[in-house]
Amino acid sequence: MLYFIEQLLNGIQLGMLLFLLAAGLTLIFGIMDLVNLAHGSLYMLGAYFAATFADWTGSFVLGAFLALLATLVVGMVLEVVAIRRLYGRDHLDHVLATFGLLLFFNELVRLIWGPAGLTLPLPSEMLNAVQVLPGLYYPVYRLVIIGVTLAVGALLYVLVMRSRPGMLIRAGASNREMVGALGINIKLLYTLVFGLGAGLAGFAGLMQAPILTVQIGMGENILIAAFVVVTIGGIGSIRGAFIAAMLVGIVDTIGRAFVPDLLHTYLSEAAASSLGRALSSMLIYLLMALVLVVRPAGLFPAAAR
Amino acid sequence: MADALLQVEDLTKRFGGVVASDRVSIALDRGELHAIIGPNGAGKTTLIAQLTGEIAPDAGSVRFDGHDITALPVYRRSAIGLARSFQITSLFLDFTALDNVALAVQAHAGHSFRFWRNARGDAALREPARATLKDAGLGARADVLAADLSHGERRQLEIAMALATKPRMLLLDEPMAGMGPEESARLIEILRKLKGGLTILLIEHDMDAVFALADRISVLVYGRIIASRDPAAIRADPIVRQAYLGESGGAHG
Amino acid sequence: MKLSPAPRVAVNIFLVVFLGLVPVYAALTGNIFAMTLFARVMILALAALSLNLIMGYGGMVSFGHAAYLGIGGYAVGILSKEGIDSGFIQWPVAIGASALYALVVGALSLRTRGVYFIMITLAFAQMVYYVAIGLDRYGGDDGLTIYHNSQFGGLIDIGNKTVFYYLCFALLLAGIYAVWRIVNSRFGLVIQGARSNERRMRAIGFPTFRYKLAGFVIAGAMCGLAGALLANHTSYISPAMMEWTRSGDLIVMAVLGGMRAAFGPLIGAMTFLLLEDVLSRATDYPNLFIGPLLLIVAIYVNGGIDGLLGRGHRG
């Protein structure tokens, strides 16, 4: 039972990371109608920047802060230089272009930092585990991730739902031309939104760096999961992204933890571990397929376009 | 109404708190040209969508030639003889005018699970298409890409495509929209020739066309039919004048 | 519709002649690698061709097409491992299994559109990818070596590199011809019409879903054949055949070559793979150049390379 709760917490933590990525993706889909395969690259850059800056400055927090800034800058430069030429184009052009960017960034990272990954050590305070429940110890840092992401999510919610810029963002998601016609500087809005998405991705990357990984190609794996989250949640919906992220994070983690064992009780050792691994990897896709069959536009689709 | 080809009864549709169609009832006799007029936002689009099968009504029924088609899918309505044109031109822009109409012919020429023969060389499709284009006044423009046609020509193509499916009834959604006086006059002539043989439901703002062509006129306001009479009676009806014609000064709506 | 500007036809003819002569060149110079390289180009061109049928003409952007390369390849590999070497059994299974999976994927995915369609096709490919990784008996993550090529009795010996090359050549040309006929047939016009304006298609009376699904299945089956060829070509199968980046590569090839041109996928495959090859030799970091190139093509070139050669409006 305690093991289950531990895995549940892990699932929530994974869900938080997915939320950060999905929120950016869904905003960018929803407002600029842009399919961005290079989103994972910004996630990767966030991690690499954090590892490097933390190493230079000797401080995890400072390194993280600088990494976040750097990723924001990279995101906005990318938007101005390349991404903005893709607006209004066929999704296929987006796929082609951002696929090219993805390949480019992976190679660039390999050039600058080499093929082996990096590590980002945690500050000593965060290395402990705290007692969450009687008998259950959970790493402080993972709790920090959950906490910080919730705070970011709340800020994002306030920004998008309650502020003037947020209103523009939501208006842009429903009706691009109208917002342009109102005289708002669409170009700037788009650059900022893209930058925001990049920042969120980079933030997710640097947050997970100490406990998971800093290596080339790390973006691709989680990106697909993020796409699944956006699809389930509904394009353009932050609320949908959050709920879907929790669903996906929990289903994936609990699935991986329990499905192989579940199969062991019915199948032979060899078959169970093969099938178990395959099945638990597929769970989130089966979930997405299920949702799409019932709701072809996700759980909380934004206004029709 | 023994001869009613289209019978719409108590059609109702709500979107949240808004009643877009409020117990709409219309009956069209065979060969009749029936116009529906009403201010913008009256629910004309919703009504058409329910008649074509794109939206399912919350209540009420649509009967065509005696058969209940309320729940019939969009693509089957053309097969039973109900054709439509779109308010906002909806063509195959990267195909020629002839290709466009030929596709409409093809839709009613059996199944299309034929993978080998060149469809553009198939006389069974091309000849009827060419003839229909001529009837619609576009004979000379057959090989022009739809994207390269003028606005008026595109509207004509819309009609041609509807006609090519050999329908018994035409549902025309603001066919005159955006047309100049010359083009409108041409279209009025085409429709005048068609009615009698075809049953036509015409949604229009262009009052000249409506009063020139309609056998009967229904007035749709806030989702309700407030009057359904012959043109002279409609013109004289004080309720209609106040609700609709009066508001816009009797000029083009 | 005849729309053949001289440059495009010239390129097509040149390609066919060039590919036809590669084995001659190889025999004369002893450069077997050329045959290996171009056989691979033609196999992936066949895969890109099948994708182009539904993507270029049908507007269905499938980001999971590499799954059929994998299914076709694994059909050959698995049967081979289980002692069934006959191509007469392996290849129909490869094609059939791919068609079946395409039927399932299509039936579910085609209910969605736009970005959702792209994502769900990606997900279905991932599922097959993970299943392959989980198949320990057939190599799992490491893949499986195939020790015997598909056997066709006395009919044809594809163990012979030259014979295999010409088989790929013939199948590719047959495929190009078949796709060209399909696209201009009644069926093809329905698929194209559905891409152009699906709402209108349904309004004039076409039940578009079943036609799109049929197209999807045909494309899957054709790609399954390419997978069987690929397995024989490399004598090796692995989950990497169906990585999503491989699906991405196929999309790139189709777009690069021009999406509504008969020879587009071949041009695209040739360009992409040769570029990859040349750049890999020139630098340790080829994607530093390929990446931005894709970006530039996507932004500035409408219609892919074929668009550069002449209006790529109709194949």
Image: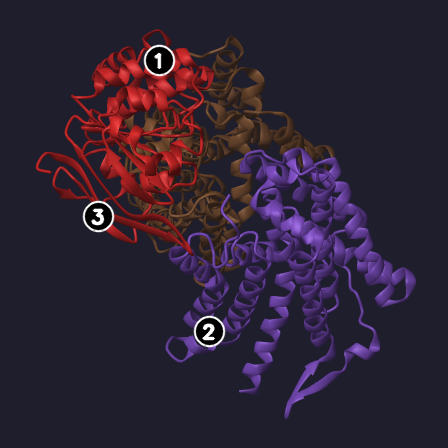
Q: Colour of chain B?
A: red
- Does residue A11 show up? yes
Is B118 displayed left or right of C75 in the figure?
left
Asked if the residue at tag 3 contacts the one at tag 2, i.e. Cβ–Cβ closer than 8 Å, the answer is: no
Q: CA distance from mark 3 to mark 1?
A: 35 Å
- Does residue C157 show up? no
Do the residues at pointers 3 and 1 share their chain?
yes
Q: Colour of chain A?
A: purple
Q: CA distance from mark 2 to mark 1?
A: 72 Å
Q: Name the residue tied to disc 2.
A: A259
Do the residues at pointers 2 and 1 share their chain?
no
Chain in brown on the image: C
Question: Between tags 2 and 3, which lies in front?
Answer: 3
Query: Quarter-wise, where is residue A227 in the image?
Result: bottom right
Q: Name the residue tied to disc 3.
A: B61
What chain does badge 3 belong to? B
Residue flagged by tag 3: what amino acid is it?
A: Ser
Residue flagged by tag 2: what amino acid is it?
A: Val
Q: Name the residue tied to disc 1.
A: B185
Q: Secondary structure at mark 2?
A: helix
Q: Mark 3 packing: few (<14 Cα in 10 Å), some, or many (20+)?
A: many
In this orientation, which residue lies closer to the viewer: A133 or C34? A133
Q: Is residue A154 above or below residue C72?
A: below
| Residue at left offset 81%, top offset 57% | A67
Residue A47 location in percent, x, y? 75, 58
